[in-house]
Amino acid sequence: MSKQTHAFQAEVAQLLHLVTHSLYSNQEIFLRELISNASDACDKLRFEALNNNGLYEDAPDLQVRLSFDKAAKTLTITDNGIGMTAQEAIDHLGTIAKSGTKDFVSKLSGDQKSDAQLIGQFGVGFYSGFIVADKITVETRRAGAAAAEGVRWISGGTGDFEVETITRNERGTSVILHLREEALDYANTWKLKEIVGKYSDHISLPILMEKEEWKDGDLIEPNNEEGGRQPGGMVKTGEWETINKASALWTRSKKDITDEQYADFYKQISRDFEAPLTWTHNRVEGSTEYTQLLYIPSKAPQDLWNRDKKAGIKLYVKRVFIMDEAEALMPSYLRFVKGVVDSADLPLNVSRELLQESRDVKAIREGCTKRVLSMLEDLAKHDKAPQASAEVTDVLSDEDKAKIGQYSKFYAEFGAVLKEGLGEDFANKDRLSKLLRFASSTHDTVSVSFADYKARMKDGQDAIYYITADTLAAAKNSPQLEVFKKKGIEVLLMTDRVDEWALNFVHEFDGTPLQSVAKGAFDLGKLQDEEEKKAAEDAAETFKPVLAKLKEALKDKAEDVRVTSRLVDSPACLVVTDDGMSMQLARMLKQAGQSAPEVKPVLEVNPEHALVKKLDGSVHFHDLAHILFDQALLAEGGLPADPAAYVKRVNALLS
């Protein structure tokens, strides 16, 4: 193929402009990204070679090599992995593969730290080379292809790139960075070793560099008046040395691994810029043997709620990389967990389809799930330590003190997705229920557990009361809470979109039923004295004629109309039957484009309210009835079916 020029995908062109015109807070991430790409290429070769050993050609030892040429101002990262064909080079280096959306570029801002973080998260690490280079040359050949099918790709990081065919004897890829003047520090052995030690020490492949040694300067000719020697310098010896540990971190003993090394390994596999919140590293023995190294991130990824995004942990079999996102090893509600599982029992040719059916995989999945839940339970146990006395916190170990407040941070990022487990993982439903946190009518922060609530229940209270709403403000100010506030009864405020769905699977906690304050007839049981019950019955009897007229006026909107004692300041509210779908859930389903049954709520009216008292004998009865209903609908987050008619009625009464 003769030399051809191609235009970059529009998003890549925008990205390159940002990369080349922004000063990143951490320039050296480019080397981490390019070494990770080289390691991935070797992993892909190892995997494909399971079915075609000939792909190794005459070089079975996989490795990454770093070399530099100060005179030419170049830094080269070479791997002997899978390599690329000409079309793959065009596709992979000219587009933001798979994650290539305008959404990516829109997230790149002037925030230097977040820019660097996004480079890795969106799988576009190759382009980070332009942070230090004003031109990049890539020379590559696909494993198994002829030497004459090599490819050279060249770009100056502007609007286009060139591709041509070359002869390349070695399989794999060389990324040649033509360094900018201000980036020549990276053509330095000491600097490169420092960066590899910091970011890539745990790559399981050897990273090689050519050794250097000091050479004295040559003697100056005697007839030269100055005499002495020319300046000495470091020269390359032709021998290559491994500059990383080149052993998989998870295979080493925990006592030999520092916290910093664990954190660096997490950053490498997750492409996250932040350190993880916590992690667990264990070797599991028994009927199924495997090693697990699992991390909980400190921040939710950008695509946590993207249903099309594959998620899962890395699967190795006997240290051979098998797949990057093995969904079968972790339930969907724990999709934020990063890490590695290395199995001693699975076959090397295991596929995604086989993973779904394997008994060993089910055992690994259950083991990993329980281990993650144990980590979360440990964080939750120490979360409220700051509220304890100094005597209590003083006896905590440094490790336990470090956990103080960590669960709150976790829950703010991942609490909503954790709730999905209530409907997906029945075996661990009780454990998950204990991990849930909510705001309440007495606590604005999302910190109240079911156990906390139970410990504060009033004498005679036989249910855990809760309300769901779109926002915390809507929940706190809901008319349904009025009598609970009056009596000092705490109500949990649930405002995550997943709450309505999740609560279909949780009906009680530790033997105490959960009761929505917006469902069913109002009954506080022992918390309501006989006098109050008698007054409510008398009001219902006295109000019967008005109720009958309201039912007739609202027959198309309301399932029923009744007197209630759950209201104090509001004239009316809407509730649904005990077994009915909530109005909020019905709205959510419709917003998501799903079918939902038409919910006809029950209108409850407060007979002591001045507006309700005016109904009896009013010439505007019909309009007032509809206004009462529509206002109750607005108060619980809905909208009138005919907003214009509602406004017209209100205006007519006001005038």
Image (cartoon, helix red, strand yellow):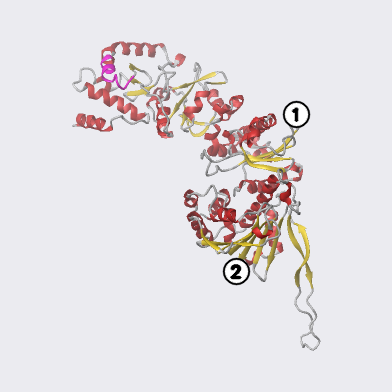
* Relative depth, front residue between 319 and 452: 319
Residue 210 visible in the shown view: yes
Q: Position of residue 407 (x, y in %)?
A: 59, 36
Q: Residues within 10 Å of mark 2 (few under 14, many from 20)?
A: few
Query: Seen in the image, is 449 located left or right of residue 191?
Result: left
Residues tagged 1 and 2 counted as in contact (Cβ below 8 A):
no
SS for tag 1?
A: loop
Q: Measure how far apart labels 1 and 2 are at the Cα level.
A: 59 Å
Query: Seen in the image, is 391 located left or right of residue 242?
Result: left
**Amino acid marked by disc 1:** Ser
Magenta-tinted stretch: 548-558
Q: Position of residue 296 (x, y in %)?
A: 62, 40
Instruction: Quadrant for residue 387, please give it.
Output: top right
Quadrant location of the N terminus? bottom right
Image vertical order of residue 402 relative to residue 464, above or below: below
Q: Position of residue 402 (x, y in %)?
A: 64, 41
Q: Residues within 10 Å of mark 1 (few under 14, many from 20)?
A: few
Quadrant location of the C terminus? top left
Query: Seen in the image, is 8 located left or right of residue 286?
Result: left
* Relative depth, front residue between 341 and 293: 341
Mark 1 or mark 2: which comes first in sequence? 2
For disc 1, the marked residue is 287
User: Residue at (79%, 89%) from the top-left corner?
Assistant: 223
* Relative depth, front residue between 53 and 379: 53
Residue 181: which disc? Answer: 2
554 magenta-colored: yes
Looking at the image, is mark 1 or mark 2 nearer the viewer? Answer: 1
SS for tag 2?
A: helix
Residue 402 visible in the shown view: no
Image vertical order of residue 448 relative to residue 527, above or below: below
475 magenta-colored: no
Q: Position of residue 246 (x, y in %)?
A: 74, 50
